[in-house]
Amino acid sequence: MLDCTTEKIYERSAGVINPAKTCQPIGAMYAALGIHKCLPHSHGSQGCCSYHRSHLTRHFREPVMASTSSFTEGASVFGGGANLKAAIKNVFTIYEPDIMAIHTTCLSETIGDDIPTIIKGAEIPPGKVVIHANTPSYQGSHVTGFSNMTRAMVAYLSVESQPNKLERVNIIPGFVNPGDMREIKRLVDLMGIPFIMFPDTSGVMDAPMTGQYTMYPPGGTPISALRESGDSCLTLALGAYASGDAAYQLERKCRVPAVVLKTPVGIRATDDFILTLRSAMVREVPYALEEERGQLVDIMTDLHHQFHGKKVAIFGDPDMVIALTEMVISLGMQPIHVLTGTPAGTIGGPQGMFEKEIRSMMDQAGIEGRVKAGGDLFELHQWIKRDPVDLIMGTSYGKYISRAEDIPLVRVGFPILDRGVHSYLPFAGYKGAMRLIEMIANALLDRADRDARDEDFELVM
Amino acid sequence: MIDEKMLDEILNQYPAKVKRSRKQHILIRMPDQDQKIEANTRTVPGIITNRGCAFAGCKGVVLGPLKDVVNIVHGPIGCGYYAWLTRRNKGRSDDQTKNYLAYCVSTDMQESDIVFGGEKKLVRTIDEVVDIFNPSAITISATCPVGLIGDDIQAVAKRAEEKYGISVTAYNCEGYKGVSQSAGHHIANNGLMEHIIGRGDLEEAGQDFTINILGEYNIGGDGWVINEMLEELGYTIQAVMTGDGSFEQLKNAHIADLNLVQCHRSINYIASMLEVKYGTPWLKVNFTGIRATANSLRQMALYFNDPDLIQRTEAYIARETARVEQLWEPYRRICQGKTAFCYVGGSRGHHYQGLYDELGITTVLAGYEFAHRDDYEGREVIPDIKSDADSKNIPELQVSPDPLRYRLKIPAERMEELREKISLNYYQGMIKEMNEGSIIVDDLNHYETEEFVRILQPDIFSSGIKDKYVVQKMGIPSKQLHNYDYSGPYAGFEGALNFARDISMCFTNPSWNYIIPPWRKKPLLQGTVLKGGE
């Protein structure tokens, strides 16, 4: 397994080997699925749309509906305007969505199709909405694409309809699973705070089996709620990379103050989330939440001997990796290799933010380790070969390194292609942290059991 | 059953232009008529199709399985990423340091590469690949922007080949070329034909019954089942295109005495070229199902016309059929009388109908995602297929007899005699085998899937990942026939049993019984109405 990967680290200046990122459009497609009755549309070759739908379907095990402009060589030479206009007409006639969310591809970006102008010239039935985001695949990553489509929701739809803000908070959950979105909504509900979450893929990408297929399941943020987001008094962007840009756009456009927080995964980030809600909206934290938190701390203290001091390699998307790093440090573990494939700078945000943030956490905890944005899994594997770890945390792609080095893998992030159920349950919040601790401890203990000699094999651990 | 009137009602949802187009891609089977179908034409923009692109067909399908080749994807990151480990490219290697299947190499083009050109980055990537992997062969596959900005990947490949003395080949398989993956199969296979096959030094097979297997992609280990079966019968397999395939074997593929064609769609033109260039005839085989496997083995034996081989083949078929039949009956009882949709890429949409039939399952709708008319109507239609703007941009490779290596593998008279008996250089297509009243759909889309399932209510739907959960949400089990839902092998006798087990599992798994909650089946209040006055 991965026998060509050697300990010797080559200086590489060209391509990527075994990427830890993919391209923008899939993120845009996923974000658009979080609008109620929305059909995402890929303006490019058929293959892009096919790849994104397949990949999202493998992660969520749910139908992923999206249409494509089906570029041919002619369209690539003469421009994709005619294809997009035909697509808009056909989509509204045949599939009857309320809204179409168009994203571009490297093909339509390279030829320079002007999407707003094409939309203006298209036949859009009355009452229907078309929005778009530019998502060139040669910039950023799938996280950037998610961010761009989320910002487009604000740019096209959010309006400030009245001078006074309402006592309501906008929550931008970022590139997380529907299980996380449900959990975040539950936390805000427990705090008794009115909110609008967008995008919201719960009820869409975790729809129940009913024996009836519905192209547009009941979930997703209603268009009306997206419009009203301009009247909320606060936006919480969870994860700087996936959510920050939309929140700032909303601040500029509709004067809704933006606060950027970490993805609420792990005790500290969840505490920050709750504390921010508490002080901004002046609400006491209900006992039910304090009880959950107390249970989590109980679990952390009860089990700390099972994970304390263990070395971890973490990879995945930046918002999730930042939160996971903070979390494993709070458990007394040592994240010594931390890597994301997404380039370091957020759109409009500071450069090098990822490395700086992780590095400062490591420094505070007195951990010496490596951190890299824009890295790949070939390099991560080489780091692990040089400085072995007890555990890898990351996506399904980590299973090859896990097997090659015989190190357990905890699957977290996007995508998980080889295991089910994960997207229904949260990693977010106190409950999500409990789940993660269970996964981490079990992975380490299963490994200890497997490796134990008969005389060391224990019933109670 | 669906009649013309019902079909028209389904199509009426479409705008007029779309309706006109789609009408030509759908047939209701009338065995007494010579039916034509439109295929390999553009998907209408906005239609939710299952089709992919030329890159997916080239790098994803044909080049991807070559285990001892480092496949570089030149483009932004997505295409390389999605074509990495997602198709089940199973490969075994004696030397694992020469097995590159788990690696993905992409030039990860950035905006500056799009603006200023990506050739330099590609050159550096090749240098790094040689440094790290030391491969005997490298391929370069282009993604959409590469063609648009004019990177000359052919020139880069040529220079790298000279610099390193290894095989470096480039494939202009930009996603916008052609109308589906099929264009990419063509581009990839043309490249292998032009640059790899014949590159080896071998002149003679040196072994009896030496064959190549074309269009077999080893999904779920199908290729290994086929190899074991054929090797037991005494065949020598020179090369497979391209499941568990290797550059080292492929470069000597010219020595074979016979080429088997499993997936007609993706490779029939290469089989024809191999015949023109090296004189090797090809035989359409189908190792899906008990009958089809037995039939293919008999035809192969007849081609070689060796009494011992024929005898061994018959003994093998008798032994394996008896073994499988013993285990078959419980599965057949579960499946008997059920109906299926069978919508797959290029050949499986046809091949699996036979296996379904052996289980007692009738295929009521079938189609191909990226086939051409000959896959539906048979090879006799090829002269009538008109080329259009999309097919013209896929280069046609012209080959001529190799002055040194061309030789007739069997005498001309014997060829004529065999043509009467076996599928030599011939494929009859899907339509002829379909039952009266069944539906044939080319490039089946989401709307049509919903409508046809609603009306025909099949017991099982077999297609791919994108439509799987749509149909399952309707309470109908869906079996992926692109990737077998990560099961398999399904080829040969043993594979047929695996398939029977998996399909039966779709029907018997208890989870389907829980879809309706019990309270939906019972009234909230229950009681008896008392008679008046009491």
Image (cartoon, rainbow, N blue to C red):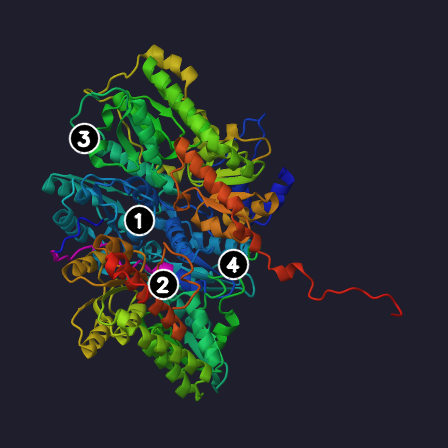
Which picture quadrant has residue A283?
bottom left
Q: Are marks 4 and 2 in contact (CB under 8 Å)?
A: no
Q: Which mark is residue A123?
A: 4
The residue carrying mark 3 is: B199
Q: Which mark is residue B492?
A: none
Q: Are marks 4 and 2 on the same chain?
A: yes
The dot on residue B85 is 1
Disc 1 secondary structure class:
loop
Q: Is residue A239 visible?
A: yes
Camera-near label (1 vs 3) is 1
Residue neighbourhood size for the residue with mark 3, other residues' Cα within 10 Å, grouped as few (<14), some (14–19), many (≥20): some
User: Within the magenta stretch, is there residue B33?
Assistant: no
How far across and down, in percent of the image, does residue B80 sit? 28, 51
- Name the subunit of mark 3: B
Mark 4 to mark 2 CA distance (whole Å): 21 Å
Cβ–Cβ under 8 Å for marks 1 and 3 = no
- Of circles 2 and 3, the one toward us is 3
The span shown in magenta is: A8-27
Q: Please name the residue that numbered disc 2 is placed on.
A: A134
Which quadrant would the C terminus of chain A be assigned to in this image? bottom left
The amino acid sitting under disc 2 is Asn
Which chain hosts label 4?
A
Q: Nearer the viewer, residue A350 or A64?
A: A64
Identified at 37% across, 59% down, the residue is: A26
Distance between the alpha carbons at the discs numbered 3 and 4: 55 Å
